Image: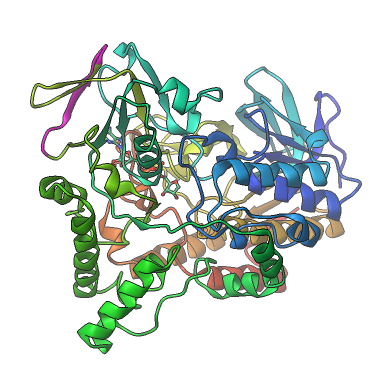
Amino acid sequence: MGSLPTQAEQAYDVLIIGAGLSGICSLIHIRKRFPSWRVRVIEAGEDVGGTWYWNRYPGCRFDSESLSYGFSFDKDLLEEWHWKEAFSSQAETHKYIKRVAEKHNLYKDIQFNAKITTAHWNDTEHTWTFVDEAGDKYTARFFISCLGFLSSPTLPAIPGIEDFRGEAFHTSRWPRDLDTSRDFANKRIGVIGTGATGIQTITATSKEPSIKSLSAFQRTANWSAPLRNSEISVEQMAKYRMEYDAIFQRCAETPSCFLHQADPRKSADVTDEERLALWEKLYAEPGFGKWLSVFSDTYTDRQANELYSKFMANKIRERVHDPDVAESLIPKNHGFGTRRVPLESGYFEAFNKPNVHLIDLQKTSISRITADGILTSDGKEHELDVLIYATGFDAITGAFNAIKWHAKDDRPLIASSDSKEGERAIWVDHKPSTFLGLTAPAMPNMFIVLGPHQPFGNATRSIEHAVQVISDLLQYCKDKNYTYVEPTQEAVDEWTQHVIECSKAATLTNEVDSWMTGVNKNVKGKTVRRVARYTGSAIEFRKRCEDCKLSGYKGLMFA
Ligand code: NA7
């Protein structure tokens, strides 16, 4: 390693931004691999956990299996840890992450309450300098972005937000000391948004016996299906511990690293009875099987998708007493599974309660937020004491966009094409260009975990893999005494084209607006669909990363 600048207050070999699962996994591995290196994590929150630190809203929990989620490299902790439920709650998951941090003595290397605001590349020194909100500076040779792909919350672009006199907050900024059974007593609660978060929040809040009323404001109906959670006893957990190797092996063999795999048959290969039998079986089982273990053409063949959607629509009709409400809850503009399917624990039954109301914004839209609630276009004012924004995130590129980047040649990372900086930006109009999703052009010495163009599936599995690849690459730099690494434009173009080609296979998903297709109407410049995530399989992704390493890192420039 060349010498680091001395004038900076804090100089590191590796700076990690974010102390969620990606950040702590990076810290553990970098420390282990490079014991003499100075490593520091910068984190905006007060504790480790990332997603599981910020999202404390009621009902927040996994909808992938707890057993498939832990760090597979930490065998001791797998032996020690008891997942209390098949689908762990936020509190338990956060406890797990804290335990990882304590066990590996990570806290001493993490700077909390520090939000990075600007980043400057120094092309002479081959270093990045970061400045946080408090004005503190950190200089680093390499940095690992562990910013998260759903970490930048967005409020709806609705007039009057600032007028509301009651309590209002975004689900991922849930007040830490709020006790729903106490603080929601006798209150009229409103929730805007019915994505995965809204569905969990609405379900849990509807079960609060003390609330006066709950109004769910739904702009787009979302498909959702039963989670079927259960407790894991001490005896069961002891048994599961012996199966961990097989569990992680299975994750490694599926396209999204979940425990579920599509049925290789096509919908039309079987009789109506056989088809129904598989669907009923999956519906009765816990977890994502009902999204991911269906017939292989369910998300590519329109007719196959329509059939399955009809099956799911009937399930909703069976569960919701009021037929009009049921029809409003059944999505009409997209087929089942073409958006990420949230799993629920009584969501549809919530609307059978007399004090729970669905406001279908397709029938009457929100005109404005007022001092006392929400005014809809039919002239009705829905009076509220608490207003919860379950309105999602500026996904994938949002956390990058929250930092002012001065990359190589002082280029900004993100800018819209119609802006002054548009011509020089690296990701114009939020369109990422990367090499293997791990590096980006004109952003030397940056490595990304769970960023654009990476597979997102089972997050921990993707994180472990990305951190491994990055550690190997850093080892290569160390061994060769390189202080500079950047992808070639050719490699970036080729990889970005591959990501776009892969996305074409997800035919029906591509026809739907969602954070997965890069749309968020609350964010300037995100009104049209774009390819921001890797939809090829995780298996293919791993292979391409391995090929790159075996080729001596073809596609990367070093100095
Ligand atoms: P999502 O899935 O992006 O959902 C956001 C929800 O908020 C969705 O129902 C939106 O409706 C709704 N929304 C956003 N803006 C508005 C306005 N202005 N008016 C009305 N409704 C609005 O975010 P989540 O937090 O639920 O989930 C994100 C991921 O986290 C999830 O997929 C899991 O992977 C975990 P829309 O559909 O845009 O009409």
**Image spot of residue 57 (x, y percent):** 47, 35
Outermost right residue: 36
Q: How many marks?
A: 0
Magenta residues, start to end = 363-372
The image quadrant that residue 407 belongs to is: top right
Left or right: 522 in relation to 440? left
**Image spot of residue 282 (x, y percent):** 37, 71
Q: Quadrant of ligand 1?
A: top left
From this viewpoint, is residue 143 visible?
yes
Q: Nearer the viewer, residue 135 or 193?
A: 193
Left or right: 294 in relation to 181? left
- Residue 282: in magenta span: no
**Image spot of residue 465 (x, y percent):** 65, 62
The image quadrant that residue 417 belongs to is: top left
Q: Nearer the viewer, residue 303 or 513?
A: 303
The image quadrant that residue 476 belongs to is: bottom right
Question: Residue drawn 65% across and 24% down?
Answer: 132
Question: Residue drawn 71% across and 45% down?
Answer: 24
Question: Residue drawn 84% across and 36% down?
Answer: 4
From this viewpoint, is residue 146 visible?
no
**Image spot of residue 181 (x, y percent):** 45, 27
Outermost left residue: 378
Q: Is residue 471 above or below residue 306?
A: above
Q: Is residue 132 above or below residue 513?
A: above
Question: Residue drawn 26% across and 88% down?
Answer: 270
Q: Nearer the viewer, residue 336 or 433?
A: 336
Of helix, strand and loop, which mostly describes the magenta segment? loop
